[in-house]
Image (tube, helix red, strand yellow):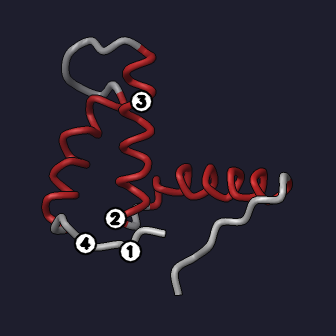
Amino acid sequence: MHKPKIVRSVEEIQRVHDLLHPLATGEDGPYIPDDVRGRLRCSLDSICWILGHECGKTFEENMERLEAELKRFGYELKRPS
């Protein structure tokens, strides 16, 4: 397992959030095809989760479902101690 290290400041992560948000949600900016917008939305969801935003629940719920499905097939994700 990789040892996590913090390589970006909260300000940098928030800046990426602020840039992605209007593009991923379609609130502003240029036309973006739905499939690309969906990938941007996934990135935004994970950043929201990292920042502790309420909208980060989607990422958290997806991870919980993925972990449960892997466990059902005999896999278990090890957590760093």
**Mark 2 belongs to which amino acid?**
Leu
Task: Give the image location of residue 30, x and y in percent.
Answer: 20, 15
Disc 4 marks which amino acid?
Ile
Rendering coords of residue 65 (x, y %): 71, 52
Q: CA distance from mark 3 to mark 1?
A: 26 Å
Chain-order first, disc 3 or disc 1: 1
Q: CA distance from mark 2 to mark 1?
A: 20 Å
Please tell me how crowded label 2 is: few (under 14), some (14-19), or many (20+) other residues with Cα within 10 Å: some
* Label 2 or label 4, whichever comes before in sequence order: 4
Q: Which residue is labeled 3 in the image?
A: 39
Q: Which residue is under mark 2?
A: 51
Q: Please state if 66 lies on the left or on the right of 51 as rendered.
A: right
Q: Which residue is mark 4?
A: 6
Q: Identify which residue is drawn at 40% across, 67% down.
A: 52
Q: Is residue 19 above or below residue 5?
A: above
Q: Which quadrant of the structure image shows residue 78? A: bottom right
The residue mark sitting in front, 3 or 1, is 1
Which residue corresponds to the image point at 38% horizontal and 55% vertical from the top-left? 48
Q: Residue 31, relative to residue 12: is it above or below? A: above
